[in-house]
Image: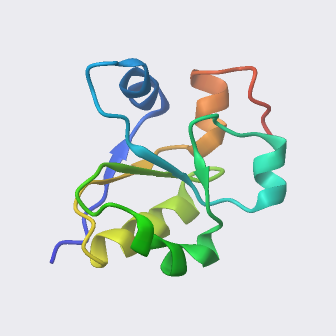
Amino acid sequence: MSTTVQSISAHELAEWLADSQRTPPLLLDVREPREVETAHVEQARCIPMHQVPHKCESFDPASDIVVMCHHGARSMQVAMYLVQNGFARVYNLSGGIDAWSRDVDPAVPTY
């Protein structure tokens, strides 16, 4: 099985979320609660990285999943884990919430 994870930019994700013709992805924020309190994307489901192995049973393996963190490293690890465990349509948000704050929504604080 391939462990290839596709990348998606903050702009591409914003366009996807704004497109009423497309089914929105599960936007999975794998940062710690303290980080999510500082800055978050409203549509995101927050599950800290270490909890994903126990919670991913509730994810639909046929749906699109976009994983995000602060800059993209933790989310890439989680995205690779999901692909290795049968999730086929997984994307890593390049640059994480930092890119979202800088490129899409400056109201979301950077940290």
Residue at 22 percent of width and 57 percent of height: 62
Residue at 47 percent of width and 68 percent of height: 78
From this view, report whether residue 13 is shown above or below residue 70. above
Quarter where residue 11 is shown: top left
The C terminus - image quarter: top right
- Front residue (pair 45, 2): 45
The image position of residue 27, as x and y in percent, is: 48, 46
Specify whether 88 is left or right of 81. Answer: left
- Front residue (pair 20, 93): 20
Quarter where residue 96 is shown: top right
Specify whether 62 is left or right of 81. Answer: left
Residue at 60 percent of width and 70 percent of height: 49
Residue at 58 percent of width and 21 percent of height: 104
Quarter where residue 50 is shown: bottom right
The N terminus - image quarter: bottom left
Q: Work out which residue is located at the far left of the displayed protein and give it.
A: 1
- Front residue (pair 96, 46): 46
From this view, report whether residue 109 is shown above or below residue 25. above
- Display coloring: rainbow
- Front residue (pair 94, 37): 37
From this view, report whether residue 24 is shown above or below residue 37. above
The image position of residue 42, as x and y in percent, is: 64, 34
Specify whether 102 is left or right of 57. Answer: right
